[in-house]
Amino acid sequence: MSRILKHPILKAARQESITFYFEDRAISALPGEMISSALFAAGIRVFGHHPRDGSPQGIYCANGQCSQCMVRVDGVPMKACMTPARQGMHVQPMNGLPVLPRVQPASHSEPIEVIKTDVLILGGGPAGLSAAAELGRAGAKVVLVDDKAALGGKLVLQTHRFFGSVHAVHAGTRGIDIGVRLAEALEAFECVDVWLNSTALAVFSDRNVGILKGDRYVLVKPEALLVATGAREKALTFSGNTLPGVYGAGAFQTLVNRDLVRAADRLFIVGGGNVGLIAGYHALQAGIEVVGLVDALPQCGGYKVHRDKLARMGVPIYTSHTVLSAEGKDCVESVTIGAVDDTFRPIPGTEQSFACDTLLIAVGLDPVDEFARAGEAHGLRTYSAGDAEEIAEASAAIFSGRITGRRIARELKLTDEQIPEAWTRTAEILKSRPGEVVPRSEHASPMDVDSLDALRGTVFPVFHCTQEIPCNACSSVCPQGLIHIDPSDIRKVPEYLSESLGRACIGCAKCLAICPGLAITLVDWRANGEKPLVLIPYEFPVDTLQPGQEVVVLDVEGEVLGSVPVVSIAPTPGRDGTAIVKVEAAPTIAQQIAGVRVQAPWVGEPLPTALEPLGDEAIVCRCERVTAGEIRARIRSGFRDMNQIKAVTRAGMGACGGKTCNPLIQRIFREEGIAPDDIVPSVPRPLFVEVPLRAFAGKVQDEGEC
């Protein structure tokens, strides 16, 4: 583990470091950096050992949702992923149950303030920010609460360009830049009050919402509550699933893209949705080897352009496969996968093992909707937007928030503006799942490579995006108007209209630079010679390629086409981070070239012998170390009440409050053939997030105290 000093998109800012101590070892941290990130940068992945079985504990979610990263900070248990490092602090691993220090009386106490507002928004991500701006335009008094130090939600982790509509949701712009734009838009509205580093704790029966604002507890009494809290990642049960080194895509992107920590050397990914595919690409950009990716479905569930981009970088993709186990003593050392049948059962004899130090879990998301359910139960006017309402892309969350903001303003009678029908249509398109794959011949540039004389002197784009997904970035930037995407349905694939319009491409490469899927190349026959130049978008450091160097080029599916010489490589003006590589290629492969191989084939080779996975040893409840076998035994003995299982096994009784294990227990019920109506769900805790008890008494600590 180390710092990322060179990245094609992100710039490492030089800052003075501070020093804290972990087990008396001096650790350097950047100002404001979380303890977990500083420990990872120092090569420390084991943060402690569980009191029940001594198992090593480390980071998992990096978002405050679980308790895997708990450490003792100056004697007090704290989550390493949510606690900033301070100069001189002493951090100890959580080895067993802690002996708490003698607590000094708080300096003073203050009455708990009740703050009234028109709208309380929980979550400063794309949905919450868009809703706040719409409500601000209507003059609503808004309090927006987010538990991070900066607005943007998961946008601050997304270095890739976004799909969708250029005019509606900034398609073709990187997520990190979209987050900044949305946050800056709120500065125009004095009626919108933003609370950072503040955590929503609960919605109470008196319709007050408890907020830990910094270290001070307050109550907010809103006329309307908008829940835009996003989603939490789903977990998987398999042998070794809690080893340090097994963690979610959000944790990986937090370490790599937010904190510029090289969080792995060799990464294996479980899950072929957009989250897993994008995380693989982010890993390659950070100089991390991606050993492979598995998806239990016959095809990856994410956008095909994301899948194709990863494949042509040299990453092996195994569909109809699943993870069977992660192996290692204190950290992940290898992973074993196997093929699955039509019922997703592993097929004996298909096991393969791979050496890796990190296993990234990206198997879907669940809405963080407990605040919405509590608000509705207590009769508070409650709304949801973004992933808290429906899991979709971040571009859809932007528009979802805008629509919900307008709806709230209307229902509070702050505006009489209607929600335009076009907004509803755009929202439907942005939320749509990947569509049909169109045969390439129906939309790619119709150039006949056998007619070389007809091609000389021309330059034209080749579109390698063949799946219907919402995006119109390329058609929006073409200065000749030669790229057409149906404006009434931007899910259609692009068409090249040079022949019908009687105009020619000028080779500006703007469509290459803006394409979120890096799925457009240019074939340039304007130079004299028997071989054309092929222009390829490239989002890796430009010094990794040199003119004259031979590179391996691949087609859209990742199949090798051959080796070709690099003519030049240069950044594109005004498109930070995207370079254009020019190669000289034979006419027979020029239009098939979709990318340059970044990763050597040997990276993804399996170990000579597959390792034997275990069965019911997989951990379901991380906090209390309860196995799948223990849960399954109780279900087979007749348990149907999740509260009863909790009382007997302690599953769900840990610090995270069942956020991770409850969905897994429900899954085991399904596997055992128990109908959902026969299951009594677990009773949720009244507080959804941990909080020091002193906060409820209005106790205030002096600066520097825990």
Image: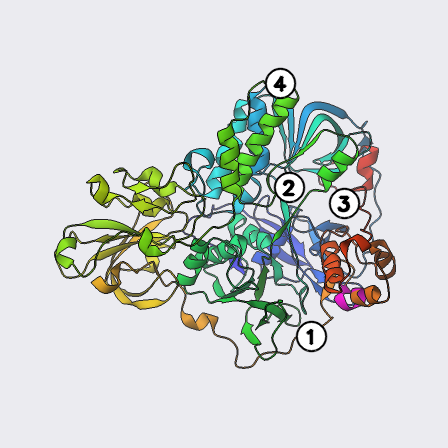
Rounded to the nearest angstrom, the CA distance separating label 3 from label 4 is 36 Å
Marks 3 and 4, the one that precedes in the sequence = 4
CA neighbours of label 4 inside 10 A, class few (<14), some (14 to 19), many (20+): some
Please tell me whether mark 3 sits on a helix, a strand or a loop.
loop
Residue with the mark numbered 1: 614
Rounded to the nearest angstrom, the CA distance separating label 3 from label 1 is 34 Å
Rounded to the nearest angstrom, the CA distance separating label 2 from label 4 is 24 Å
Marks 2 and 1, the one that precedes in the sequence = 2
Inspect the magenta stretch and tell me whether residue 630 lies in it.
yes
Let me know if residue 257 appears in the view: yes
Q: Position of residue 194 (x, y in %)?
A: 62, 30
In this rendering, which labeled residue sits more in front, label 3 or label 1?
1
CA neighbours of label 1 inside 10 A, class few (<14), some (14 to 19), many (20+): few
Q: Which residues are magenta?
A: 626-631
| Numbered mark located on residue 388 in the image | 2
Let me know if residue 653 appears in the view: no
Task: Kindly indicate whether the residue at mark 3 contacts the one at mark 2 (C-beta within 8 angstroms).
Answer: no
